[in-house]
Image (spheres, rainbow, N blue to C red):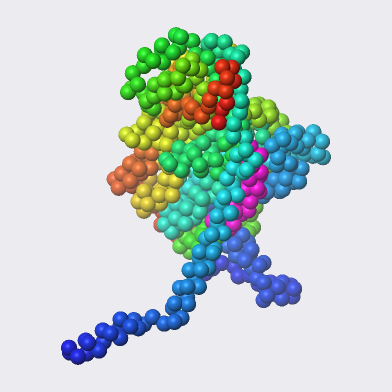
């Protein structure tokens, strides 16, 4: 679907006309990311992060395929093959540093993209499916990132594999056999490394597939916008090409500047020195933490230290950690306010910022050692995190009195001036 | 009315609208379904521990060099095992704990072999998420209860390697083992 005033694809070159009659792929591109896709004219910079995430995915796939040409997924040589990439392969160091820091950058971009959704109510009808697919993408990203982290087979890799598969051992009855099945042994070994490599290569292409669905679902109602007011007329939109392609291009350039700065000047800033020690099943590193992008969820995992009625503390922590992300699936139905944008929701806006603070606290505690006071602090923050979704959101959407909404996007941009409202977008 | 009912009922019982084709459909889909599902067995089972991994199922360790109060780490199924020679004080400490108050109630006697109560042999795998706890090496933290301490998520084990504090749900696992001689123990 698109708006009736969307530009129509009219190929002028005879070959393109011939093509359009047989395989209308250029038409699809034109209508999806070209001049045939009308976009609200008032999108702010927070809307640029979806396109940046796509660029990140492409960078990860290209550098990843190159690394796979030089990497050996065998526990006796994997660590050495990574050093071979770093020291001997032409430009190997660049590929690996871009891939490792690119993964972190991907998460930065996606976190902003998700919080854009939280703030502007992007998950609300009619875009629930866009949101649900987005949560699926985030889960796939986390699985892919985890398995990629295991591949260099350093100390942090090995113990990440052990601890994360250990999460599944918390499941009653089937937990331990399940963990052995996942690892292909009693502890992480060659079988684990091999299957993680296989899946780490597969999942990015699954992500590509779900991204296509994510964009498809988005293009049914079209993009939301900072006012949350639906598009009413042609003057509310401008075509995606050239306007937003140009705007996205500029932020991609800025993003690449930061990625390059980290890659060239602080390539190990986000890594752990212990991962330059080959995997040793006999000794756990003193301070074992996942990469920073998992810290908030890791803090929730560790917040459960005592049994909860009949549920053991370990299982409770695991359930809470997975639940803290799975709860996002319910978001469209927990927040019942008909007003999308937090710009017009004074009460929700306050709680949005409190949630940001709670996430920041969890983030900090997740990276800290499992000691007091971090345990108590993460318990409080985790309790607030769940309360935000399960208690605060439903109550706020019931009692809140939203600010008056503008009549249309055009009015929000140009004011109530009559001539402004009538003037076409372009 | 009565006559109609009599003539209708046998027809339904006999035919009931079931055709030969329905039987063929159900039979074909059932066979294909069972066949399709049974291919999942090798597809899933291939990920389980392979024969060579399972073959490393027992290991023998010489414990003659372990002095009272010392502990070592051995390897069993590519996982570390603690072998610890408890001091009399540590044995007393473990026996003084009220068993009912424990998260995973077990006595030291239940976790060791008879007349070999000073030899505490447990997996060196935290029952929380599988890290190797500290406490075997010289100068390592033994936690608040003098046994082992897992640095990953802060689980404290006592001198019988029982969970006392932190997120781990169970005591350190005691593997099957036997004393081949006074100085050699066979694990597995």
Residue A417 visible in this rendered orientation of the protein: no
Front-most of residues A412 and B188: B188
Q: Report the residue that reaches farthest toward the front.
A: B181
- Residue range in magenta is A189-214
Expressed as whole percent of the image width and height from the top left, the position of residue A405 reads 39, 52
- The residue nearer to you, when weighing B163 against A311, is B163
Please state if A283 lies on the left or on the right of A357 as rendered: right
Q: From the viewer's perspective, is residue B37 above or below residue A385?
A: below
Name the image quarter holding the N terminus of chain B. bottom left
Tell me the quarter of the image containing the C terminus of chain B.
top right
Picture coordinates of residue A48, whole percent (x, y): 58, 48
**Residue A335: % across, % down:** 37, 48
Membership of A207 in magenta stretch = yes
Q: Residue at x 68, y 29 (%)?
A: A278
Nearest to the observer: residue A276 or residue B55: B55
Residue closer to the observer: B48 or A17: B48
Residue B65 shows up from this direction: yes
Where A58 falls versus A370 (above or below)? below
Residue shown at the point (55%, 48%) measured from the top left: A140
Residue at position x 57%, y 26% from top? B186
The extreme left residue here reads B2
Reply yes or no: does residue B30 show up in magenta.
no
> Total label count?
0
Residue at the image position 52 percent from the left and 22 percent from the top? B121
């Amino acid at each position: 679907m698109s708006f009736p005033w969307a530009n129509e694809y009219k190929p002028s070159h005879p070959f393109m006309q011939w093509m359009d009659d047989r395989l209308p792929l250029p038409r699809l591109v034109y209508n999806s990311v070209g001049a045939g896709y009308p976009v609200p004219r008032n999108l702010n910079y927070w809307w640029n992060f979806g396109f940046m995430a796509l660029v990140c995915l492409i960078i990860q796939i290209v550098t990843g395929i190159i690394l796979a040409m030089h990497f050996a997924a065998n526990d006796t040589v994997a660590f050495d093959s990574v050093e071979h990439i770093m020291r001997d392969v032409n430009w190997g160091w660049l590929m690996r540093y871009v891939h490792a820091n690119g993964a972190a950058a991907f998460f930065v971009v996606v976190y902003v993209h998700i919080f854009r959704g939280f703030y502007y109510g992007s998950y609300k009808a009619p875009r629930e499916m866009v949101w649900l697919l987005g949560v699926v993408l985030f889960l796939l990203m986390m699985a892919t990132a985890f398995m990629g982290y295991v591949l260099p087979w350093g100390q942090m890799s090995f113990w990440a594999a052990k601890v994360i598969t250990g999460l599944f051992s918390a499941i009653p009855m089937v937990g331990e056999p399940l963990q052995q099945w996942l690892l292909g042994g009693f502890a992480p070994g060659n079988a684990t490394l091999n299957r993680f490599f296989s899946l780490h290569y597969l999942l990015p292409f699954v992500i590509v597939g779900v991204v296509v669905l994510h964009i498809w679902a988005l293009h049914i109602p079209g993009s939301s916008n900072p006012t949350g007011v639906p598009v009413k007329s042609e003057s509310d939109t401008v075509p995606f090409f050239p306007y937003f392609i140009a705007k996205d291009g500029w932020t991609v350039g800025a993003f690449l500047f930061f990625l390059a700065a980290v890659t060239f000047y602080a390539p190990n800033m986000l890594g752990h020195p212990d991962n330059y020690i080959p995997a040793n099943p006999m000794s756990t590193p003193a301070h074992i933490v996942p990469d920073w992008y998992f810290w908030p969820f890791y803090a929730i995992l560790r917040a459960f230290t005592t049994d909860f009625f009949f549920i053991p503390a370990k299982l409770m922590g695991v359930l809470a950690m997975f639940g803290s992300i799975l709860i996002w699936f319910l978001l469209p139905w927990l927040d019942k306010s008909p007003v999308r944008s937090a710009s017009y929701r004074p009460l929700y806006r306050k709680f949005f910022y409190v949630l940001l603070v709670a996430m920041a606290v969890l983030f900090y505690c997740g990276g800290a050692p499992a000691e007091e006071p971090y345990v108590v602090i993460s318990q409080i923050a985790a309790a607030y995190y769940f309360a935000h979704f399960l208690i605060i959101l439903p109550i706020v959407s019931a009692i809140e009195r939203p600010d008056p909404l503008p009549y249309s996007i055009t009015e929000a941009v140009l004011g109530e001036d009559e001539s402004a409202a009538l003037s076409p977008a372009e | 009315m009565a006559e109609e009912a009599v003539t209708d009922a046998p027809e339904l019982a006999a035919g009931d609208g079931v055709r030969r084709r329905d039987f063929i459909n159900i039979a074909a889909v059932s066979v294909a379904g069972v066949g399709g599902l049974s291919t999942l067995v090798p597809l899933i089972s291939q990920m389980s521990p392979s024969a060579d991994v399972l073959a490393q199922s027992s290991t023998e360790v010489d414990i003659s060099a372990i002095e009272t109060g010392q502990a070592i780490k051995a390897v069993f199924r590519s996982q570390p095992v603690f072998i610890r020679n408890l001091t009399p004080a540590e044995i007393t400490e473990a026996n003084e704990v009220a068993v009912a108050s424990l998260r995973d109630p077990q006595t030291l006697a239940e976790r060791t072999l008879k007349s070999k109560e000073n030899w505490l042999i447990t997996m060196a795998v935290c029952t929380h998420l599988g890290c190797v706890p500290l406490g075997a090496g010289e100068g390592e933290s033994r936690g608040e209860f003098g046994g082992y301490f897992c640095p990953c998520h802060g689980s404290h084990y006592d001198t019988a390697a029982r969970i006392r504090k932190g997120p781990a749900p169970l005591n350190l696992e005691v593997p099957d083992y036997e004393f081949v001689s006074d100085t050699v123990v066979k694990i597995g």
